[in-house]
Image (cartoon, rainbow, N blue to C red):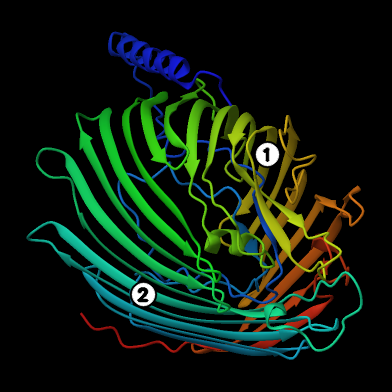
Amino acid sequence: MPTNNSTISIAILRLCCWLIVSFLFLKPLSAQVKSVDIVSAYRPQVATSSKFQFLPNLPIADSSRIALSYATSSKLFFPPFQLSPLRPLALPIKADSPFADKLYAKIGYGNLKSPFAQLYFSKGEGTNKGFSASAIYQRATGKLPYQKFGQSEIALHGFNKNLSKNLSVDAGVRYNLDQVNRYGFRTPIVLPISKDDSQNYSAVSFQTGVKTINPTSYGITVGSQVEAGYFSDQTGNSEKSIRLTVPFTKNLNESWRVSALVDAHLITIGLKNGASIANNVAASRLLVSHWGRQFSLQGGLSPVWDRSGFTLLPIINGAFKVDSTRLIIQWGWEGNNQINSYQGLFRTNNWIQVPSSIYNTRSWQAYAGIKGASSSHISYSVRGGWFKIKDVPLFINDTSSLTKGNSFLVVFEPRLQQIQLSGEVGYQVADRMAVRASFQFNQFSALKNQARAWGLLPLELKLTSRIEVLKDLYLDLAAYTWRGASYLQKGGGIARSQGAFDVNTSLEFKLNQSWRLWGQFNNLFNQSYQRWNQYPVYGFNFLMGVVFSPQLKMHH
């Protein structure tokens, strides 16, 4: 961490102002025949994993549901430790309108005594009004003793646009119930199993928001969103949270924009021993953006207040299109604040003990990279970054001789440095073929309290493809390999989990306008690898079933 945050913040502020004033007086660039709109920026992150949370058969994200978004997205709260679960690769629901009249039912069964059912219904009136309801149910039982998993979810969401008032209002509610067994015992199981080894985690959340549909005559876009949630492990530990975000954007002209964000988050964890942990955060951001035919520039500051005190984070990044090429150079120096919670840490590692304290993760990152396309079919990107991170959550397996060793302790490392190198190459031919390969290398160093970055992966490689083999026959293939994370042994020694090579594939065949057959095959090489120490994943497993999606009559 910087030894003098105030001095560095003042220097960064002066640098931002100098760059903005300099660009104001630059001569206009010569007009180009071709133009590029830069709509993305590199956001380096810490140890993101593609899929390693061993929930074996979750469905893919439903593309029919609207995701709440505002003109000003929050860069303050980016979850770099979120690990996506394993899930079937059946094709997503295709829809012309997010809330078209639609009925979608998917059912199946697999070799792990794994029933699977998904239901989705939506009804809309053009793009001005819509409602959706979805439900998921699944179970799986592995070959190891006590290796069981279950998930249920119900969600409702709707929105309404008032064009005359230039306002859009939406709201949603969601309920999750996860059954998680702690089957990673250090020694053979001794019956009976305690209640703590078979837990049901429930979560209910509600959100509502309002925003302007189009910028006003003064070029202003504004909105607000409220989210409230309750999470419980059903053993006496629970978490309550409420969050308010208010984004604001003002377009000064065709190439300049000013944006601001106010973000307040209140989190309270109630422990079964009667104690409580508060994690309250207040943050804001002021950002000035400029874009032209060949370059874009953003500069601003983000003050953050929480239990650790006050921190002023810098935001400065840019992108430049190399003349007469498809190459874009990106760079930046940014600070980020990630809010941590009991629920968020559980989603990362299902077998954690309730944390005894909570801190938010702050990072300072300098990065540079390139992205571009060598042809109409091939795209690529390479990025490198250096990080300083404060209070990063690490996961140490319980090595106490007084316990069964089937859980993980969450510790917050006060200091960590990281070098990250990532890249991606993609090849796509219309909708008939898409292949994408990516890698991410992480080097962790300069830890203050811990000997290793427990639970964080140093190397990940991923290959995904989607191919239309024949008319109405689609094949998806995903391959993953990685170097294992460090873990602590019972005697205090340090070891590293073995890497693995995991391959999954899925097929979907269209029978007619309403019916499709699907099959999902996971861990084709039947490897018994461990993402988290003492927790081997399910071996080879499959799901097979049908999809019923009738063509409903549209109403306008």
Crowding at mark 2 (Cα within 10 Å: few <14, some 14-19, many 20+): some
Q: Nearer the viewer, residue 56 or 8?
A: 8
Residue 173, numbered circle: 2
Q: Nearer the viewer, residue 39 or 348?
A: 348
Residue 546 visible: no
Q: Quadrant of residue 404?
A: bottom right
The outermost residue toward the left is 164
Quadrant in which the C terminus appears: bottom left
Sequence-wise first label, 2 or 1? 2
How many angstroms separate mark 2 from mark 1 (CA)? 37 Å
Image check: 344 left or right of 267? right
Q: Nearer the viewer, residue 156 or 235?
A: 235
Above or below: residue 96 compared with residue 515 = above
Residue 188 visible: yes
Q: Position of residue 318 (x, y in %)?
A: 45, 25
Q: Which residue is mark 1?
A: 423
Q: Position of residue 267 (x, y in %)?
A: 42, 57
**Mark 1: which secondary structure?**
strand
Q: Residue at 42% of width from left, 23% of height from top?
A: 294
Q: Position of residue 51 (x, y in %)?
A: 68, 61
Q: Quadrant of residue 64?
A: bottom left
Above or below: residue 233 compared with residue 443 = below
The outermost residue toward the front is 274
Residue 253, numbered circle: none
Image check: 90 left or right of 247? right
**Mark 2: which secondary structure?**
strand
Q: CB atoms at circles 2 and 1 under 8 Å apart?
A: no
Image check: 511 left or right of 134? right
Q: Nearer the viewer, residue 414 or 444?
A: 414
Q: Quadrant of residue 16?
A: top left
Tell me the kind of residue under disc 2: Val
